[in-house]
Image (spheres, rainbow, N blue to C red):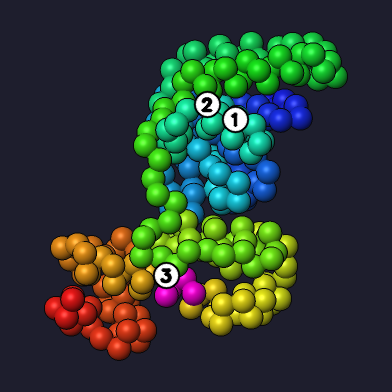
Amino acid sequence: MKMQVVTENIELCRLEEHYEETPHVHQNWVQLTFAVRGGSSDISRGASGFIPEGEGIIHQPMQEHQIRVDKGNRAIVIKVRPSLWETLRVREADCIAVEQVINPLELNAEFNRWISPLFMTDGDDRCWRSLTEANVLQYLTRNLKRGACPETTHPCLPELSSTGDPYMDRVFEYIHRSYTSPIRIDLLSSMALQSRYHFIRSFKAATGFTPYQYILRLRIQRAKYELEYTEATISAISAGLGFASASQFYRAFVKITGKAPEQYRLER
């Protein structure tokens, strides 16, 4: 069962009993999902995870995810427009953590307080909508866990330059953030607002590589850095970069660099 209220900048949902979504992305929403009774299953970037009661997770725009709530459990979802989300980040020098911890009883009570005026006015009263948005932002500002901001680009990766197409620029930003995780071509083409066929052609025209080849080269570039500057084992490097096996990593590394990983490390 799903209860939903939407304003111009915020969407509030309560999911309970048995609710399951299909995998999807939001182009213009930051989504916060909190388990307030029992737990919820989160499936994000091809990996499954369980959100225990009292915890939550944040999905950024265009990040694929799927939420499932089993019978007897409850989750609260808060979606915020990116422009409004940025005001939360500007107020603090630190970054907002992806994984969150909340008081489920408090959030349940706040949710009821947020939605009650909107149900009584059928969501048509602009004053109540603005007040609800302000109350939600106050709650998030007060409760969201923050930490030190990570570097957005690893030092071993090439700097991004604009392609002249804002949608393709978003694709490259996403790839550079997520290249160690499974990335579907269909997701990238939807971000670029192109068909799969035309996206692959335009991507290759811009880079000289197919999306798969480009992502593979980012992984190998990172592997070279790890081999040169860390003592991580080849198996650990392979797993950390998203390869299915050490042998798959080994073959890709030799094909691109012409050297085995062990040889590359010894020569540095």
Measured Cα–Cα span from mark 1 to mark 3: 32 Å
Query: Quadrant where the C terminus lies?
Result: bottom left
**Given the current orientation, which residue lies at the most extreme right position?**
124
**Residue topped by disc 3:** 218
Q: In the picture provided, is 80 more to the left or to the right than 32?
A: right
Are circles 2 and 1 on residues that touch, CB within 8 Å? yes
Q: Could you say which quadrant of the image residue 39 lies in?
A: top left
**Residue 3: x percent and y percent?**
68, 26
Q: In the picture provided, is 23 more to the left or to the right than 181?
A: right
**Residue topped by disc 2:** 91
Magenta residues, start to end: 214-218
| Residue type, numbered disc 1 | Thr
Q: Nearer the viewer, residue 82 or 32?
A: 82
| Residue type, numbered disc 2 | Arg
Measured Cα–Cα span from mark 2 to mark 1: 6 Å
Query: Quadrant where the N terminus lies?
Result: top right
**Residue topped by disc 1:** 87
**Residue 53: x percent and y percent?**
42, 26
The answer to whether residue 203 is above or below residue 84 is: below
**Residue 259: x percent and y percent?**
25, 86
| Residue type, numbered disc 3 | Leu
The answer to whether residue 155 is above or below residue 84 is: below
Q: Nearer the viewer, residue 93 or 126?
A: 93
**Residue 88: x percent and y percent?**
55, 28
Are circles 3 and 2 on residues that touch, CB within 8 Å? no
